[in-house]
Image (cartoon, rainbow, N blue to C red):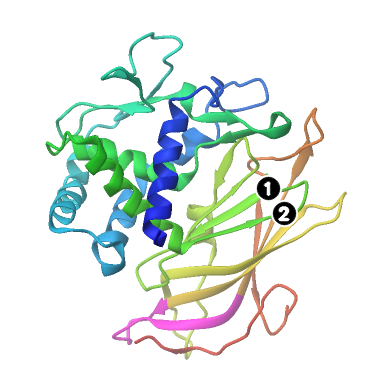
Amino acid sequence: MNGFMKIWMGFVFLAASFSGQIFAAVGGGDEAGNGAGIAEHHVVSAYLNLGEYLDLCLNSSECELDAREHALLRKIRTGLLGEYQNRRQLSFKKESELPGFFIIDGYLRVAKTGDQVGSTIYVNRDLLYRMGPGGVITGLSLESAIAILVHEMGHHHGEVDHTVLDYLGAKVMNMVLGVLQRTDLGPNRRNILATVFDLDRAGSFAQFLVSDGLRAIDLSAVLKSFIQCPSLNDEVQTLQGLSLFNLHWKWKEGDPLSLRGDLVLFCENAQSENASVVRGYGIEVNLAYRWDSQSRMRLQPGSESFKQVLCAENPSVCSENVQASSFK
C-alpha cells in the first residue's frame, strides 16, 4: 500500500469514526465543554487559509490529481472569493439538539452544505471531539478539517459523489501533512503542541499555532507583525515572507513555557529586484500556563511574549547561524 493510500484509508477510517459511537458528544472550550474549542478553531483556521492549502496541491505533481480532480479543485480554488462573500458561511450546530439535521442518506455526517458557491457549511459539533484513553478529549485536527471543507465545497461545484470528494479531500490533506511541523512538550505533556505550516518561499508567511488539547492559539499574525528585517547598507528592508522551523521547547516547572526556533526571512528594499534570504535569526516565545483539575497543563491565551534574536549572540535559541544570501 503506497503512502497516499495509507493516508486515504486513514481518512476513511476517521470519517467512519465520526459516525460511530467512539466520538463523544462533547463541545469544545473549557473543561465543562463551554464555548468554541480547539476543533472549532481548526475548522475556522482551515477555512480562512484554504487557498494556500489548495495551491499546495494544485501546484505539485506529488498531489497525484487526475484530470477530473484537478478541474474540480481548480473550481473550488477559483470559487473561494465567492465563498467568502458569505461572512457567516461556517455554522456550528449539534445533531443532539437538532435530531435528523445531519442525517444524509441514512448516515450521520460531520458536515453538510448546499449546492451553490457561498452556501452555508454546517458543522456537527457533536462529532468534533472524541474521548480517548484516560478520559482525554481529542479534537478534530487541522488537516482533517481541511479535508472536510474540500469535500463540502466540492458540492458547491456540482459534485455529488461522496467517494470522489473523500479522495480529493484526502489528497489535499496528504500534501498539507508533508509540510506541517509539530512539536510537543514530551511524555505526559503531549497535549502541549506547536504546529507550523510553512511553504518556505517569498510571499508566504508561516502559520504558527500552539495548543493544549482544549484550545488553539493562532500566533501567525502576531509573529508576522513582530518580526523585522535587518537594515542593509543603512536601508530599511521590508518583510516579504518568513519561515519558522526547528522548533523546540524549554521548560521546567515554575518557569514560563519557552518555545524556540529558527527563522528564515525574505527581505526586500527599494533597490532590490528580488527578495533576499536572511538567516541567522531565531525566535523565542514565552507562554504562561496553569494546571487544570486533572493536573493537565493548559495555556493562558493572551500571555504570549516574543523575542527576535541573533543566533550568534543567543546560540541556545537557534540551531544554525547562516549569513544572508541571494534568493534564487
Q: Quadrant of the N terminus?
A: bottom left
Task: Point out residue 209 in the picture as x, y percentages from the top left corner.
Answer: 55, 51
**Counting other residues with Cα less than 10 Å from the Cα at mark 2, is it few (<14), some (14-19), or many (20 or more)?**
some
Examine the structure image and report whether residue 10 is included in the region drawn in magenta. no
Task: Point out residue 50 in the picture as x, y percentages from the top left corner.
Answer: 32, 49
- Which residue position is annotated with label 1? 192
Left or right? Give the position of 141 relative to 72. right
Residue type for callout 1 = Ile
**Counting other residues with Cα less than 10 Å from the Cα at mark 1, is it few (<14), some (14-19), or many (20 or more)?**
many
Residue 305 found in image quarter: bottom right
Residue 175 appears in the rendering: no
What residue sits 31% from the left and 67% below the top? 62
Task: Point out residue 8 in the picture as x, y percentages from the top left corner.
Answer: 38, 49
- Which residue position is annotated with label 2? 185
In primary-sequence order, the first of circles 2 and 1 is 2
Asked if disc 2 and disc 1 are in contact, CB closer than 8 Å, the reply is yes
Left or right? Give the position of 149 relative to 319. left
Residue 110 found in image quarter: top left
Count up the numbered dots. Answer: 2
Residue type for callout 2 = Leu
Residue 47 found in image quarter: top left
Task: Give the extent of the magenta segment.
Answer: 267-281
What residue sits 17% from the left and 33% below the top? 160
Left or right? Give the position of 70 relative to 308. left
